[in-house]
Image (cartoon, rainbow, N blue to C red):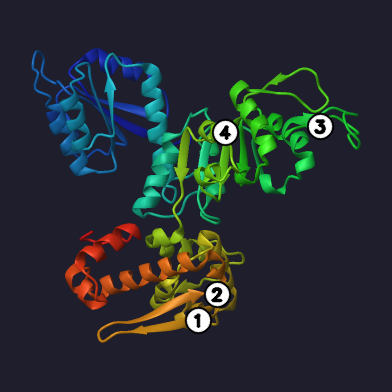
Amino acid sequence: MSNFEFILLVVDDDSLIHQALKACLNKPWKVVSVEDPNLIPKDMFFHAAFIDMHLIKNSRDPIGIRVIEDLHKKDPNVEIVAMSGDLNRETMEACLLAGAQKFMAKPLSLEEVNSILEKIQAHWMIRNFDHESHGKHLIHWIGSSPLSLKIKKQIADLKGEKKPILIEGETGTGKEVVAKLLHHQESDRPFIAVNVSSIPETLFESEMFGHLKGSFTGADSNKIGLTEAAHGGDLFLDEIEAMPLSFQVKLLRFLESGEIRKVGAKETIKIQTRIIAASNKPLLQMIQEGLFREDLYYRISSQKIELPPLRNRKEDIVELATHFLSTEKPKRNKSFADDGIQELTRYSWPGNVRELKRICEQLSLTSPLPIIRKIDVVPLLNKTLVTINTKDLVIPLGMDLSEISLGLDTLLKNAEKFIIEEALEQCAQDIENTAKLLKVSKSNLYKKIKDLQINSKES
């Protein structure tokens, strides 16, 4: 990453802007300056572009919007920042519609410029992990679905963020992966990860904040707590929903003051540790149940990333499965046949990415051929096949026996979603024909598509 060069295009009729940016920006950024948009190099690739709105002196015409449209049309991946001293709302919103990601007010703030470029750089490295080196950091988010691209952008946008960050998602959706990606965007710093549910309640305060020798029975020496061990870096609290209410107030006090008091100590210590918290359960629901403090929730969730279950981003399954096979040790040079992949995508994955990884590891070991077929996949998914027949529709509905614990309501919703998705596919996404096939009204079908979050071309 240190040897990689990023190219910033600057289009502005003010030569002082070009001089200032060239003077203040260091590696890995290289500035390409253009005062006339007609002189933008046609065949040159840019990672980012700063475009001024008023490129003709004494003109109020924001022709920069047309420049943004042309750049975005040529390469939708270039991250464009519009800039102007005229903060006309219509102009600013038109810039976003044309393809800009942000609008920067003039006079430019060097701090804001560097922050924006750091986030663009981080986004590029996360999004293009397979094409560019990530240095010594091998953690990355696999997937190119719209939901995965959104997650990568959220991670990059949090580069340099000092406030706590909350990651919510079902078990196995990749919360620790996201936490490590958030951490690795910064320079080398401590990263301490702990599963809150694994800390005994009687030792919780000592583990989190440390203790002094002799402060209680068994305290044979001074101990540094987790918050202090992560000083200058990140403390990842996984399964924070398991934190006892009596200790949630202590964590809240630390987050508000930045100070800790070790067990047995009289004085407090000031430390700088960013908290990255993760929860398998919706914390807002736990607040309503009286199991989580509302004030702590708002303190840790000022920045929040919600991870979707794998069943909602099935477009990523092929990429994930291929990755897991390719990283197996020892390498066995196996790949999926089309019917094997089809079977993986039909499954609902209650265990999410973690379950997919386990299945791929087993398939790599047990499949007798270099290609992994449907016949190899089905037994490992532990399926009971239930066939639903109508005059025109036959659906093999896979039910994973391990899903029983999800409860009847969730199982019925999953089954209903699966049936509608299959019917839509067989009707080429035609809502009217699908409604006739399923013997429901179009309005009812539209409502179910919306409620069940089903992707449909007509929804």
Return the mark for residue 223. Answer: 3
Closer to the camera in the image, 220 or 436 = 436
**Secondary structure type for disc 2:** helix
Q: Is residue 339 above or below residue 298?
A: below
Query: Residues under labels 1 and 2: Cα distance?
Result: 7 Å
Q: Nearer the viewer, mark 2 or mark 3?
A: 2
Secondary structure found at label 4: helix
Provide the secondary structure element on which disc 1 rests: strand
Question: Closer to the camera, 284 or 24?
Answer: 284
Q: Nearer the viewer, mark 4 or mark 1?
A: 4
Structural crowding at the residue carrying mark 2, measured as other residues with C-alpha within 10 Å and reported as few (<14), some (14–19) or many (≥20): few
- Judge from the rendering whether residue 327 lies leftward or rightward of residue 53; answer left or right: right
Q: Amino acid at mark 4?
A: Leu
Q: Which mark is residue 296?
A: 4
- Quadrant holding the C terminus: bottom left
Q: Residues within 10 Å of mark 1 (few under 14, many from 20)?
A: some
